Amino acid sequence: MALMDFIKKQFIDVIEWTESTDGVLAWRYPFQDREIQNGATLVVRESQLALFVNEGQVADLFGPGTHRLTTQTLPVLTNLKNWDKLFASPFKSDVYFFSTRQQLDMRWGTAQPITLRDKDFGAVRLRAFGNYSLRLVDPRKFHTEVSGTREVYTMADLDGQLRGLMLQHISDAVAQSGVPFLDLAANQVAFAKALHLATSPAFEAIGLQLEGVTVQNVSLPEELQKILDQRIGMGMVGNDMGKFMQYQTAQAMPTLAAGAGGAGGSVAGDAAGLGAGLALGQVMAQSIQQGLQGGQPAVPAPAVVPLKPDEVMATLEKLADLKAKGILTEDEFSTKKAELLKKLV
């Protein structure tokens, strides 16, 4: 009886892995000082692969199924150990199991804004975050490049490296996406596809397959966000420059009216600002009415109340800012400037 217990203790008949926890990518079977019985059973479950390694040399790889371990089913190991085809003795070898299940909801993101180069705006700073999923597809490469002789290798051990790979390829993804920098926030799907394409080779180099990438948020710098808001404003008026100028001036009317009242400190100043706002509103209403009536002439608008010098200067400053940002051309700016100068009191 003691002899049988000794034999059972020394020789292994069944080799398997039940994956008791999530997030484990590689697991080494605990042989200790025991040997594998010739003809032993290797059980590889679905979403697993098993790899035999002999003294640091990668040998035979087994997919899902139940395998009987003999010289016929272990050709590489047989060659490495120089076994005879009729070899039937117990043997030693490391056996590593790998999980090929998809690892979901892995997070990536920029801890700090990263600087990218954009053809329209030069150097810009971007923040973004999202998640990705992957699976292990090449145990030989993963064992050689990453996990090695570790007893257990988990996603937590690899998370920092993979997150760095994602961030490293963001600038390439922005370039490959073909999406203008200002439109990245509104084209997250295209950005995610480009990031997936740019990062996949780095994952494949260590035996992993990048299954999917999502971009949950892209934050633009404040100054570019203002330009984006202006583009949205232009879209609201159909990209018509005249209507956009009316829209911009209408947005500035409260400030102009307040400035006129504060500068003059009189009812006349307030009335001038209010009159200019009302006149502009009538012009915009006239434009809208013409569009609805198919271009029919509208009732002439009342004469515009003359503006004071400080009001004209404030409006000119806004127009100059639009010209500097490329929204107004030099000719459009000059035309508007001439119109404003004619309205001086």
Image (cartoon, rainbow, N blue to C red):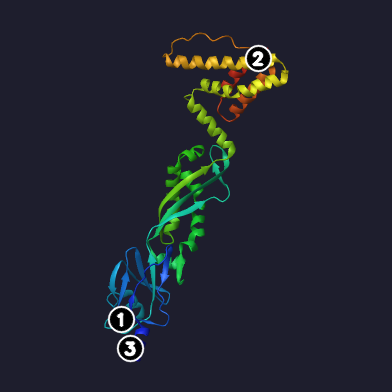
Q: Identify residue for label 3.
A: 4
The three-letter amino acid code for the residue at tag 1 is Asn
- Please rate how many residues cluster around mark 2, counting C-alpha atoms within 10 Å: few if below 14, some from 14 to 19, many from 20: some
Tell me the kind of residue under disc 2.
Ala
Residue that numbered label 1 is attached to: 38
Toward which corner of the image does residue 43 lie, by quadrant?
A: bottom left
Number of other residues with Cα within 10 Å of mark 1, as a class: few under 14, some 14 to 19, many 20 or more: some
Q: Is residue 198 above or below residue 279?
A: below
User: Of 240 and 329, which appears nearest the observer?
Assistant: 240
Q: Amino acid at mark 3?
A: Met
Among the two numbered marks 3 and 1 on one chain, the one whose residue lies closer to the N terminus:
3
Distance from disc 1 to disc 2, alpha carbons, whole Å, reads: 102 Å
Look at mark 2 in the image and give the residue it sits on. 271
Is residue 40 visible in the rendered structure shown here?
A: yes
Q: Is residue 294 above or below residue 156?
A: above
Q: Report how far apart the C-alphas of labels 3 and 1 lie in the structure.
A: 17 Å
Q: Please report contact status of discs 3 and 2: CB closer than 8 Å, yes or no.
A: no
Determine the residue positioned at 49% across, 59% down: 159
Rendering quarter of residue 84: bottom left
